[in-house]
Amino acid sequence: MSTFFIENSELITRLAVALLLGALIGAERLFVHKEAGMKTHALVSLGAAVFVIISEQMAQKYIGLVGFNPTMMASQVIVGIGFIGAGVIIFREQESRLMGLTTASGLWVAAGIGMASGLGFFNLAVITTVLVLIILVAMNLLEKPIRKISENGDKKY
């Protein structure tokens, strides 16, 4: 059993980093009571990592094969995540309000973090996760007073 972990330590590390970083972003979303939380973000990040690893391993296995482009699989992750993100975005007619954009954006970035982790670009993945958390937490704190001013302004007219 230990041989399995030694032989696959790089893959395990890549997948674990993707999962953990995605879960961190999901934890923030869960904390602010949003639709997609830790499991969703972790799964998106992990799934993106898996597809990039498959793409990378296919490139190594089928090197020199004419007409074969393993990067196509990685590009389809972006398309797939767009489909999931579109499902998260809803329009509430009674409030004339569009909801879920930040969650959809978070899932999109979680996929990018997973892709970076899957390729072994851990610095990129960690730095991006930190920046995403800064955006989600710090921007939320900055937006509260702006929203308050905006709501007060709406009531005057």
Image: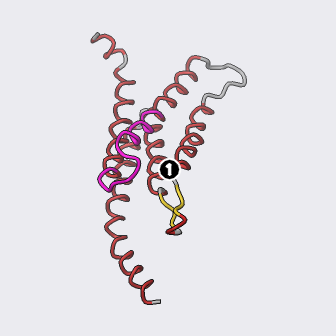
Residue at image position (38%, 76%) is 146
The amino acid type, in three-letter code, at marker 1 is Val
Residue at image position (43%, 42%) is 113
The residue most toward the left is 2
The residue most toward the right is 67
Disc 1 is placed on an element classified as helix
Q: Does 104 lie within the magenta span?
A: no
Q: Which residues are magenta?
A: 30-47
Front-lying residue, 25 or 65: 25
Up the image or down, 157 lies above or below 81; here it is: below
- Indicate the position of residue 140 as horizontal and vertical percent values: 35, 64
Q: Quadrant of residue 40?
A: top left
Location of the N terminus by quadrant is: top left
Residue at image position (40%, 47%) is 36
Up the image or down, 89 lies above or below 110; here it is: below
* Main SS category, magenta section: helix
Crowd class of label 1 (few under 14; some 14 to 19; many from 20; radius 10 Å):
some
- Indicate the position of residue 10 as horizontal and vertical percent values: 37, 24
User: Where is mark 1, residue-wise?
Assistant: 88
Colour scheme in the image? secondary structure
Up the image or down, 31 lies above or below 65; here it is: below
- Indicate the position of residue 55 as horizontal and vertical percent values: 55, 27
